[in-house]
Amino acid sequence: MSEKISVKVCLGTTCFVMGSANLQELIETVPAKYGDKVEVSGVPCLGLCSIDWEFSKAPYVKVDDEVIKEATVEKVLKAIDEKLAAK
Amino acid sequence: MFIDIDCNQMKKYNQNAYGDYFVSKRYPDEARLIAVLSDGLGSGIKANILSCMTATMLLQFIENQQIPIRKAAEIIMNSLPVCKVRRISYSTFSAIDVNDDGYAKIVEEGNPQFLWIRDNEIMEPQFETIQSKTFKNRKLKIYRIQLKLGDRLIFCSDGITQAGLGGGRLKLGLRREGLIVLAKDKLAENPDISSSEFSQYLVNQARNIETDRKPKDDISACVLYFREPREALIFTGPPYHQQKDREYAEMFANFKGKKAIAGGTTANLISRELNRPITMDTTISIGKLPACSYMEGVDLVTEGILTLTKTLEYLENGTQDIDNAAGKLVKFLLDSDCINFMVGAKLNQAHYDPALPIEIEIRKNIIKKISNVLQDKYFKKVTIQYM
């Protein structure tokens, strides 16, 4: 098995008010489902809203290098599944 | 030297307004502080109005610098009316005008004599007396003293010195002697106690002496403590000119004192420029605010606007000990004396998208409001640098 998949939840102001607070459950569900193959953490800011603001796609989550716009728990889990399947 | 000042008060039992009034103002440009404690005749609303008028007028007289503290106090002493029924003055007062070098001018009229404590011993300063030309029973005491690092001054209303009067144990009340014992014992036990905690302690002790712990008069204790300032720096918001990031990051790194960062982009900037990694708290949010993160050499790292907005709310309401990022920032601020803000002027357009579920304030405005409340309510020294 290669490196862990990293999931980074943006906790910057925009993402937080647009719903990243609701991604809290990833902290518990991901380790329960995938064990130590995936690592979830918050990050102070991914810096995406300030360059992508006209499209207003916050909250943002990064799964490895892939940016997930308007992230939800389902979208993040789906992206993790796809990454794992590709490995 | 930094002057740590605070006043705590308790109302007379069964009253709904404070009869003593305390007011204090710092003048950072002149490195000066003026404070006045006044005790109004009687209790409740009437006393509140009398003491409030006396204290605020005296402060304004002195701050305008048109007249020195001695003259201002003399004018007030000679003009305060006498209560027709009880034939006593409408109010009494103590006032201090002190600079950061520790030179202090103090006037007292009718209030208990202040305590000056150095190395846990009581100092007995010289004073000059001015007899009122209009009222036989009024005289002003004027002191000019030079304070040193570590000195403390305690001003109080007679609610403290007369606490317990007529009760079982202390027939004559606590008196000055009793207050000295209380103060010295507490300082021996906790030599670095803050003015806030110390004044609260004295007020509580006075209340505990009263029969059934019901104050028979308004109780006030104002404490000044001369010590080395505790410096703090808060960096919030990215600078307007990105090419200056490095310069500002180095300023932040070189600051001697406690440091905090409020803002995700700001934290990334410092992390990148100083090459210090960021780690997050193990949770995402605590109490509707993003969790804190951690960086070596920085005491606190939080999200920006939401946390600052909540911090302002807590400071205004006097809310403390909350377990979230804003609660931590409140503690960080209140544990400091001189607070410096470095405020980046760059705006993030995304914050002003009308689709956002809540309105996001402009950073500059929140910092201004936080600065005002820190100065006016918590007597801190605040400087703001915009970048």
Image (spheres, coloured by chain):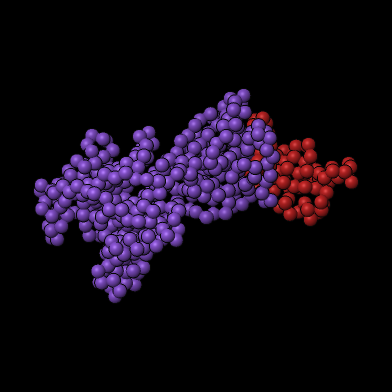
Chain colours: A red, B purple
Q: Residue B54: tell me if it is visible.
A: no
Residue at position x 58%, y 30% in the image: B248
Query: Is B234 left or right of A61, judged from the image as shown?
Result: left
Q: Quadrant of residue B345?
A: top right
Left or right: A86 in relation to B326: right
Q: Nearer the viewer, residue B181 or B246?
A: B181
Residue B334 shown left or right of residue B114 in the figure: right
Q: In the image shown, does B265 or B32 lie closer to the viewer?
A: B32
Percent position of residue B154, x then y: 33, 54
Q: Determine whether, in the image, residue B54 is placed left or right of residue A52.
A: left
Residue B332 position within the rendered picture, expressed as x and y whole percent measured from the top left: 52, 47
Query: Which residue shows up at 70% across the image and 43% down it?
Result: A9
Residue A33 in the image: above or below residue A47? below
Task: Decide which of B184, B28 is in the foreground and name it.
Answer: B184
- Residue ID at (21%, 57%): B41
Is residue B334 visible in this depiction of the protein?
A: yes
Considering only vertical position in the picture, is B162 above or below B22? below
Q: Where does residue B272 sit, x and y in percent of width and height?
A: 67, 33
For the point 34% across and 40% down, which residue is it? B99
